[in-house]
Amino acid sequence: MLNNAINIAFLIIITIPILLFILTLVRIVGEDMKASIKHKPSSPFGTHQAKKQVKKQKTVHRLRKVK
């Protein structure tokens, strides 16, 4: 009976660090996956704000050419 309890305690002591290691690996891999999946805009200008800025620059350039 005592031998059984020692074996169970030993298994618990061994499995906890292994589980923590696996959970840490899963968390690191999950963060890497999120970083690689991040949405990249298909437009070369990027965000909506950048598109507006480019449009404004083109308008200014066109108006300067007209003068």
Image: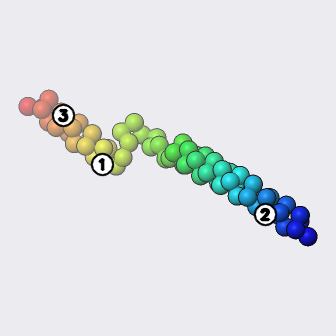
Q: Amino acid at mark 3?
A: Arg
The circle on residue 49 is 1
- Give the residue drawn at x 16%, y 37%: 60
Position in image of residue 29 (x %, y %):
61, 46
Q: Which residue is mark 2?
A: 9
The foreground one among 14 and 4 is: 4
Q: Earlier in the sequence, mark 3 or mark 1?
A: 1
Q: Amino acid at mark 2?
A: Ala
The circle on residue 62 is 3
Q: Earlier in the sequence, mark 2 or mark 1?
A: 2
- Distance between mark 3 and mark 1 Cα atoms: 20 Å
The foreground one among 50 and 29 is: 29
Disc 3 is placed on an element classified as helix
| Residue 23 visible to the viewer | yes
Cβ atoms under marks 2 and 1 closer than 8 Å: no
Of circles 2 and 1, the one toward us is: 2
- Distance between mark 2 and mark 1 Cα atoms: 60 Å
